């Protein structure tokens, strides 16, 4: 059993750490308070290869392993979870499934541009009435000769307005329930496709979360990925990997808050000594460090299983549910260690606390992860 990182993984960690400090940190407070998408920063992430890390180099990807991806996600999420969720969606929810199940033509046309970061992708599964209950898709795709007509509404779509290419799930045969769901590549700007309301959120405020409205959007049949009815399996398989990305994001949020709290505890003095010399603070730091280490092990294990070609369904759900709970606990304690200063924006930890909450909700709530884990245990 090896716990050390390879030379390549260490280089990824160093590059991501450096990028987070030099490019993401400046302006992160303003972007959060004004809900500004980190457009320039995400563009640079593409240039550095962070948007298609695991994609084969022949499609402009980085050809790296999933462990490297989790390391980069962790480092960027320490500073800006709004930028890292754009990265997670593009890598694991859009590029991964397109590379695995797309035709060569689809890969040449779309994957090459997504993996290089030339354009961003979005994953459009959730609807107003279909979140956890993802099989209840109301959006329809009706076959009409050599194309489909898509009608419906998607909710909560990350990269909603900044994406150019959208993976859209829709019912092609409602009578078959989830076995009648298909998945399509849809381009922004196609007639009848409207980017709707932007959500005003508690956290990841820089991420652009939108509803999307489809009215008779004509999608060529060649833009369907896989056979008709393959969409739900595609979504579930994709989310198994996506959850490793969000678990890494949660881990990074926790680790970022912990590092800030640790440094602050050595500087801030009360009763004649740094607060790090009070045992109550020491025990908080000990618990935070332990939880972060455990979360990191679960994240790396899930990524490693994926890299080995083993089943990682349960491991990714475990990593996500645990790391997201650690993110919540640790960020709350980081605010506490900062006292009143933790409650104001300039010390960063209140933002990390707000950002942490979403990791318990998206890509399957904590309750859904427990369903996935318990089904695996009881099967
Ligand atoms: N991996 C592979 N296949 C899976 C699977 C998994 N994790 N979970 C379910 N399936 C398959 C089942 O095997 C079954 O296939 P068959 O019919 O061929 O046997 C099919 O999917 C239906 O499964 P169930 O009968 O278990 O369906 P269910 O309705 O009882 O429950 C669920 C399914 C696990 C709750 C699923 O609906 C789910 O994961 N819900 C959460 C949705 C979600 O995570 N949404 C995230 C949206 S993206 C996002 O959030 C992005 C972001 O924020 C950045
Ligand atoms: P519901 O499904 O209505 O759940 C409400 C509550 O009931 C939750 O606590 C849930 O855990 C619980 N619950 C539901 N069913 C059960 C059950 N069977 N047993 C126990 N408890 C249950 N979706 C996309 O497709 N693409 C995206 O890019 C995307 N980005 C997002 C970004 C943000 C900021 C947000 C907030 C959401 C995003 N989502 C996205 C949607 C997200 O995946 C859903 O919000 C999530 O899956 C939960 O669905 P819901 O909001 O409809 O809650």
Image: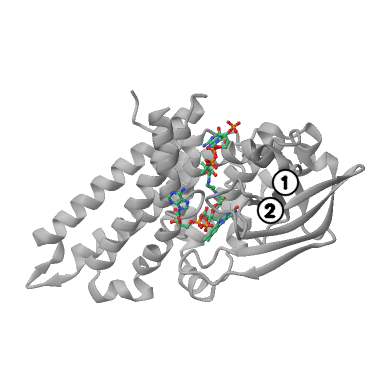
Residue found farthest to the right: 145
Asked whether disc 1 touches disc 2, contact meaning CB atoms under 8 Å apart, the reply is yes
Q: In whole angstroms, how far apart are the C-alphas of marks 1 and 2? A: 7 Å
At x 39%, y 46%, the residue is 321
Label placed on residue 71: none
Q: Is residue 169 above or below residue 156?
A: above
In the rendered structure, which disc, 1 or 2, sits on the residue that comes first in sequence?
2
Q: Secondary structure at mark 2?
A: loop
Please give the residue where the numbered disc 2 appears in the rendered image.
138
Quadrant where the C terminus sits is: top left
Left or right: 227 as drawn, with respect to 291: right
Quadrant where the N terminus sits is: top left
On whether ligand 2 comes within 8 Å of the CB at mark 2, the answer is no
**In front: 198, or 162?**
198
- Mark 2 crowd level (few <14, some 14–19, many ≥20, 10 Å Cα): many
Residue 169: horizontal and vertical position, in percent?
69, 47
Residue 123: horizontal and vertical position, in percent?
64, 50
At x 55%, y 54%, the residue is 131
At x 63%, y 64%, the residue is 210
- In the rendered view, how is the structure colored? one colour
Label placed on residue 171: 1
Residue 151 visible, this angle: yes
Left or right: 189 as drawn, with respect to 71: right
At x 38%, y 51%, the residue is 324
Residue 60 visible, this angle: no
Residue 273: horizontal and vertical position, in percent?
9, 68
């Amino acid at each position: 059993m090896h716990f050390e990182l390879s030379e390549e993984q260490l280089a990824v960690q160093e590059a991501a750490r450096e990028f987070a400090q030099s490019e993401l940190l400046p302006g992160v407070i303003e972007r959060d308070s004004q809900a500004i998408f980190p457009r320039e920063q995400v563009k640079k992430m593409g240039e550095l290869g962070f948007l298609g890390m695991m994609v084969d180099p022949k499609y402009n990807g980085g050809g790296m392993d999933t462990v490297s991806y989790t390391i980069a996600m962790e480092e960027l999420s320490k500073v800006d979870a709004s930028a890292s969720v754009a990265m997670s969606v593009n890598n694991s929810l859009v590029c991964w499934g397109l590379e695995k199940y797309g035709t060569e033509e689809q890969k040449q046309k779309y994957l090459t541009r997504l993996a290089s970061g030339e354009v961003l992708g979005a994953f459009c599964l959730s609807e107003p009435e279909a979140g956890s209950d993802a099989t209840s898709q109301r959006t329809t795709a009706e076959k009409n000769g050599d194309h489909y007509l898509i009608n419906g509404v998607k909710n909560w779509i990350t990269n909603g307005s900044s994406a150019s290419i959208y993976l859209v799930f829709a019912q092609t045969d409602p009578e078959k329930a989830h076995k009648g769901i298909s998945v399509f590549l849809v381009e922004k700007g196609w007639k009848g496709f409207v980017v709707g309301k932007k959500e005003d959120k508690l956290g990841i405020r820089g991420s652009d979360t939108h509803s999307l409205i489809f009215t008779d959007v004509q999608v060529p049949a060649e833009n369907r990925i896989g056979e008709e009815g393959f969409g739900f399996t595609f979504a579930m398989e994709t989310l198994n990997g996506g959850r490793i990305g969000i678990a890494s994001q949660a881990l990074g949020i926790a680790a970022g808050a912990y590092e800030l709290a640790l440094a602050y505890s050595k500087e801030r003095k009360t009763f004649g000594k740094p607060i790090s010399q009070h045992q109550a603070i020491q025990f908080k730091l000990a618990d935070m460090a332990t939880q972060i280490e455990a979360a990191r092990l679960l994240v790396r294990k899930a990524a490693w299983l994926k890299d080995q070609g083993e089943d990682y369904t349960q491991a990714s759900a475990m990593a996500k549910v645990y790391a997201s709970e650690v993110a919540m606990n640790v960020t709350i304690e980081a605010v506490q260690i900062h006292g009143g200063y933790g409650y104001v924006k300039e010390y960063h930890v209140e933002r990390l606390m707000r950002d942490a909450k979403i990791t318990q909700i998206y890509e399957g709530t904590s309750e859904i992860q427990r369903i996935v884990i318990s089904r695996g245990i009881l099967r």
